[in-house]
Image (cartoon, rainbow, N blue to C red):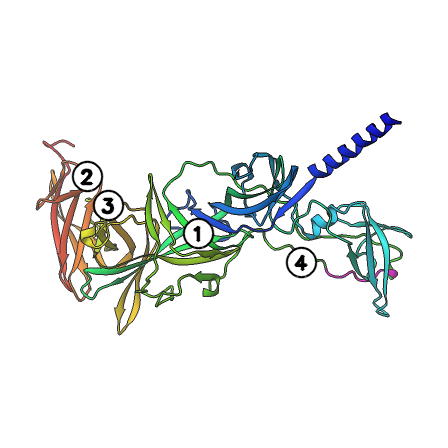
Amino acid sequence: MRRARVLLAGIVALWAAQAIAQEIVTSAAPERVAVTVYRDPNRDPAQEPNLAWLNGYALISETRTVSIPAGESTIRFEGVAGGILPQSAIVTGFPEGIIERNRDALLLSPATLIGQSLGRRVHLRRTSNATGEVREQEAVIRSGADGALVLQTAEGFEAMRCTGLAETLVLDGVPPGLSARPTLSVRARATGPVTATVTLSYLASGFDWQANYIASLSEDGRRVDLFAWLTLASQDETSFPNADTQAVAGNINREDVRAEPREGGALNLQCWPQDRTSDIFDPPPPAPPPPPAVAYFEDGSESIVVTGSRMSVANLESSSPIAVVTAEQEDLGDLKLYRIPEPVTVAANAQKQVALMTRPGVRANLVYRSWLYPRGEDGDGMPTETMQMLVTRNRTVDGLGLPLPAGGFRLFAEAAGRPILIGEGSLPDRAVENDVEVELGESPGVTTRIELVAEDLRWRDYRLVVASDRPAPVRFEAEFMDTDARFRPSRRLARRNGRPLWTTDVPANGIAVLRYRMMIREGGTD
């Protein structure tokens, strides 16, 4: 008898230990969160982020307070990013460490609700189309959510939505293992109950950011007032309110890994004809397709959140917005970190813009530039358009002197008291002391043509004619491509990028001419 009591006590102790080991603790949300957004490394600076498919990523760091029971337990971190890369997760703060970690892939949805209820008893509620009478009966789910949903009732087997009646399934509760929010779980062990401050850090896909520059040209065309937005974009399903937010510029060697797909979605049920054709009601229309797994944004301003109540101008198309609160730039090795000084909300499936920088009175010039082959189709004399460019140096003496992250560029000028868009372009990453050149588009008002003037057995004489219809003088530059010793200009030219460079001022409504020769034969031979 004593041995039986000891054996029974051991079994009870084992049951108690198993109960403790199976205890689940849920952390619903972090107390603090920091979001660091990295750009898509393969996106060209001239290309806006594809808001339907963001290929950047974010480093998210959360601080949570967790009450850990004695023994082994499962800690569930709800509300993590849906695009979490679980293999990147770092969890610190557990007194005795963690045993394992898992990303809970089964999000609560119509499909997973049915799939996890296979073999369970549910309530089937039907409403008569003729009388409106509601009848409820028990049923057992005998198939998954893919295709026809087969139910077993006291009358036999049938497929749901095949009777022509309005049908609804009612479940007593949510099956275990389903979560309404993206969740990361870990198994931990503790000698005794303890309350710990835990830090959870991980990478998540589905983010991106870009700088957007707005410049206002002065009346004399010699300076610009430069302002930049920092545009953050997220297509993740999780919002991060009041987050310490920052953006990183630079190229990082990182393997392109996307988040694992999660099971779930809408039901797409089918049925087959039953009974006689005359007895079949027209089935209700199929359920609409599930929403896309990626975020789509409208073109209107309502799709963009502008942060900073202390901004006096919040119009994104304004040529000279004034911002008091701007991002703070820091060096991070070879990378550049732009820290937003106030907490902001990185909302789910949304964009947000915050002030990145403002620099009034930057020295700059509008230049018209062409890249020419000296033969010019042997002097056909056909006019070609030139490229209008904004040119400056990233130096403190010129009004800049700070790292400029890549992004879109818009140049405005004032006419009749209102801003007019002159051109759009893009700016690659530019370090301090580098040249800054933005192509704004081709200009039909300043054209070039190469004319063949004379030729003999050894030489051909050309002239490059630049014509401008502008009411004021303009600066023009020509880079000659594919030249060698046979190219003989009539004046000494500078060089840029190893190529001959002609720089001149074209008078208002006038022309400028450069003459040069090309040797075609030397010493009477080809």
Helix, strand or loop at label 3? It is loop
Q: Which residue is mark 1?
A: 244
**Amino acid at pointer 3:** Asn
Residue that mark 2 sits on: 498
Q: Nearer the viewer, residue 300 or 325?
A: 325
Sequence-wise, the earlier of marks 3 and 4 is: 4
Circle 4 residue: 288
Query: Can residue 403 be seen here?
Result: yes
Q: Assess whether mark 4 and mark 1 are in contact (beta carbons under 8 angstroms).
A: no
The stretch of residues the image draws in magenta is: 279-285
Judged by depth in the image, the label closer to the viewer, 2 or 4, is 4
Report the front residue among 12 and 32: 12
The picture places residue 172, in percent across and down from the top left corner, at 78, 54
Disc number placed over residue 188 in the picture, else none: none
Whether residues under marks 2 and 4 lie with C-beta atoms below 8 angstroms apart, the answer is no
For label 2, the SS is loop
As measured in the structure, the alpha-carbon distance from the residue carrying label 2 to the one carrying label 4 is 62 Å
Q: Residue type at mark 1?
A: Asp
Q: Amino acid at mark 4?
A: Pro
In the visual, does 167 lie left or right of 255?
Answer: right
Find residue 333 and report its horizontal and vertical position in percent: 33, 39
Residue at (30% x, 65% y) in the render: 320
N-terminal of the pair, mark 1 or mark 3, is 1
Of all residues, the one furthest to the right in this rendering is 155
Front-most of 252 and 414? Answer: 252
Is residue 449 a member of the stretch shown in magenta? no
Q: CA distance from mark 1 to mark 3?
A: 31 Å
Residue type pointed to by label 2: Gly
The N terminus, quarter of image:
top right
